[in-house]
Image (tube, coloured by chain):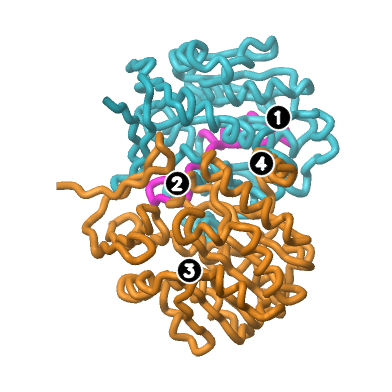
Chain colours: A orange, B cyan
Amino acid sequence: MELWYTENHTEESKFSIKVEKQLYSAQTNFQRIDVFESKEFGKFFTLDGLIMVTEKDEFIYHDMIVHIPMASNGNIKNVLVIGGGDGGTVRELTRYKTIEKIDMVEIDEQVVEVCKKYFPSTTSGLSDKRVSLYFQDGLKFVRDAKEGEYDLIIVDSTDPFGPGEGLFTREFYGNCHKALSKDGILVNQHECPYYSDYAYNMQRAHRNIYETFNIAKVYQAHIPTYPSGHWLFGFASKTIDPIKDLKEEEWLKHNLDTKYYNLDIHKGCFALPTYVKKLLEQSHHE
Amino acid sequence: MELWYTENHTEESKFSIKVEKQLYSAQTNFQRIDVFESKEFGKFFTLDGLIMVTEKDEFIYHDMIVHIPMASNGNIKNVLVIGGGDGGTVRELTRYKTIEKIDMVEIDEQVVEVCKKYFPSTTSGLSDKRVSLYFQDGLKFVRDAKEGEYDLIIVDSTDPFGPGEGLFTREFYGNCHKALSKDGILVNQHECPYYSDYAYNMQRAHRNIYETFNIAKVYQAHIPTYPSGHWLFGFASKTIDPIKDLKEEEWLKHNLDTKYYNLDIHKGCFALPTYVKKLLEQSHHE
């Protein structure tokens, strides 16, 4: 008997992974979690039937959501991570000795518990002394944050359905703006431009960020296990431009070994295909 | 009843497209051709069970295989296309009024016939007066070409199995080198770095090109219907560097409307992830 995990990318396309066995399955108060083991991708877990992390390529997503903002501002000391229950984002952040405080706000404690058991390689940073874990709604947490409290906010969320929904609204981005220091940066996962349902979410997120921040850019990465493999991230700030303000020498001093990110990628990943640029520009006028 | 086309990307992963109907199927002397119709991707065709062209995203592959070399050298007059039976590469080339001659060498006449019938939008350039079609083995054609006859050779081939196999060998690249003018450019489809079987082919192709040409670079694009969505192209030349020699002003004068390619993408697409750089560097020493 063959066991296959199948994810619908749209109603008319799907991606399947041959599974050795299912390791875990549970319905939490917020979502369904499943953990599988495969030969090709190692262990992987899904939330509500969508792949979040595979051992094979989680490094791509986590490199790109962390090192792009960290190399754009050399003075990041206080960081807020919203979502990111698998711990991969915090793990990459803890590699920077210059960071003093990392608050992580995950709505679903069970995601963290499950990942601690099955994904020790992504959760390894959660025991770092600088990390505080809050099992709360990120939307409310940011509403209550002090003005200018964070130098970096990373929104490492699911798609804008279910628990992730509020993290794509103008109210949320407005509260992030307030909670950020003068040179603060907001980065968020920004969906994919290729399939129209995802592209619609991307446009909505971008419009809301663009209306809130002086600088609102989008960058891309190749993440083969996400729909279409073409994944976007949003970069927003009151003052920092990720290309003009890139701190090459400073970043190199951290001496980090990264499997996807490098300074060429930093400069190259903001170059978007014409059709993506057009989708983003359209959203400014809606 | 639902009809799905399924492509194995590896033994343990596969991609499926819901199909409205199959339009054509035949075994030629060289390979199997199938044409399908789908809602999400429009019409698409496969060779030996691998997607070659979908109406939805063929523009990405054809933009990137043509406009990168064309913008890197403003004096391209004579072009050779090997493979590319769907016509998309020639279509993009014919948009340049400065090109004088395009020879296209496709081993399988039936691919061209089938595409003329089902993909008039990709084959539209084949009737251009500058185009000569040769139904021959590209390997032999290049062996017999005059020295310095072409300013650009584009290898728009299948993977290195079956009819495409010879187009990844050192002998073939050596003959391309001879057939190219002093500032000539060779571009080829270069497989994907993410899945190990493809990455092995990529390393082999790169090693052979690297040993033949002074300049041997690799660039990438997001092509969602190819395995992993992370596709590479090789750029090789005796003299031309695709970044240093980029002719921005000259290219803009052609006034081409392109859906994927633009001058930012040109500069950004040569920035490769660290793991891909390492795979390419390894291949130099094998």
Which chain letter matches label 4? Answer: A
Going 42% across and 72% down the picture, which residue do you hit? A122
Q: Distance of mark 4 from mark 3, alpha carbons?
A: 27 Å
Which chain letter matches label 3? Answer: A
Q: Quadrant of residue A184?
A: bottom right
Q: Distance of mark 1 from mark 4, alpha carbons?
A: 36 Å
Which amino acid does the dot numbered 3 rest on? Gly
Q: Quadrant of residue B102?
A: top right
Q: Which residue is mark 1?
A: B151
Q: Nearer the viewer, mark 4 or mark 2?
A: 4
Q: Distance of mark 3 from mark 2, alpha carbons?
A: 24 Å
In the rendered structure, are the residues bearing label 4 and label 3 in contact, judged by CB atoms less than 8 Å apart?
Answer: no
Q: Which residue is mark 2?
A: B228
Q: Which residues are magenta?
A: B172-198
Which amino acid does the dot numbered 4 rest on? Leu
The quarter of the picture where the C terminus of chain A appears is top right
Residue B215 percent across, percent down from the top left: 66, 47
Residue A239 included in the magenta stretch of the image: no
Local secondary structure at mark 1: strand
What's the mark number on residue A279?
Answer: 4
Which amino acid does the dot numbered 2 rest on? Ser
Crowding around mark 4 (Cα neighbors within 10 Å: few <14, some 14 to 19, many 20+) is: some
Q: Distance of mark 2 from mark 1, alpha carbons?
A: 32 Å
Q: Is residue B176 left or right of residue B164?
A: right
Q: Which residue is mark 3?
A: A84
Q: Are marks 1 and 4 on the same chain?
A: no
